[in-house]
Image (cartoon, grey):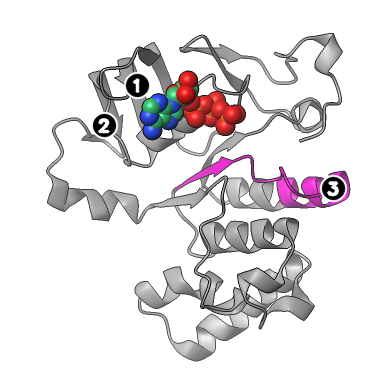
Amino acid sequence: MLTFDNVGMRYGTGPEVLRDVSFHLAPGSFHFLTGASGAGKTTLLRLMYLAQKPTRGTFSLFGRDVVTLARAERPDLRRRIGVVFQDFRLLDHLTALENVALPLRIAGHSSAEIDAHVAELLSWVGLKQQVNARPAQLSGGQQQRVAIARAVIARPDLLLADEPTGNVDDRIAVRLLHLFEEMNKVGTTIVFATHNQQLISRFPHPVLHVEQGEVHLLPPGSNPFGAEMSGATP
Ligand SMILES: Nc1ncnc2c1ncn2[C@@H]1O[C@H](COP(=O)(O)OP(=O)(O)OP(=O)(O)O)[C@@H](O)[C@H]1O
């Protein structure tokens, strides 16, 4: 599904923010992604969703070598990836329903099919009353749930989520985690960046831990932040 081999990444002429990163994500796997603020999690996700090329090393995705991939071939791979951005990136002039429907419209589904499917998913994430609201009328946690619904609606092969439960309470965080689990069961490979140790302890998935530019694979239930951070809020 995805393989990094000795990948390094720097912004401009700055220092390497990721170095010697080597790991493999098997199809259908689920990994948490952790690390202190500024450790490089978002940079790692940016590489995975092809917003950035590594400055060294090799990286393959869906069996394709990303480093030598022609720019014109990138959209095809990108369409197979769902992303929940830390800053949501919803379209302000569209309603919640229209934002979530976008990937299905692009994929050419019929309006009737889209409306029923999107309304059901929004209801599932607790936004039944907000389907016609625009992002400015929604709280941060509600916007985050719209962003999650938009990322999962088209059932991507790879789902990358950057702190997707950072703005919701623990009850909703667990509910959203169950949504990711359901997707994972039907085949979506998931990388879920979080600072929430309670989620990492509760759901048995291995952890990619970014520390000083290096990525370490830790077993399920690990507490990479140490005991003093246990139970930290998302
Ligand atoms: N566009 C950029 N230009 C230059 N440096 C950057 C850029 N984006 C990130 N960095 C630097 O790269 C390092 C890693 O940043 P990154 O955003 O990947 O960390 P993070 O682990 O996602 O942090 P957080 O948990 O706070 O979101 C930081 O030192 C940051 O200052």
Task: Give above or below for 43 relative to 35.
Answer: below
Residue 4's mark? Answer: 1
Task: State which region is magenta.
Answer: 158-178
> CA separation, marks 2 and 1?
12 Å
Answer yes or no: is residue 64 visible: yes
Residue name at image x 79 percent, y 67 percent: 126
Q: Which structural element holds mark 2?
A: loop
Tell which residue pokes out farthest to the front in this image: 13
Going from N to C along the chain, the mark reached first, 2 or 1, is 1
Name the residue at 78% across, 33% down. 199
Residue drawn at x 51%, y 39% as measured from the top left = 28
Left/right placement of residue 119 relative to residue 217 reads right
Q: Which mark is residue 169?
A: 3
Q: Which mark is residue 53?
A: 2
* Residue 57 placement (x, y as % from top left): 24, 16
Q: CA distance from mark 3 to mark 1?
A: 34 Å
Res. 41 in view = no
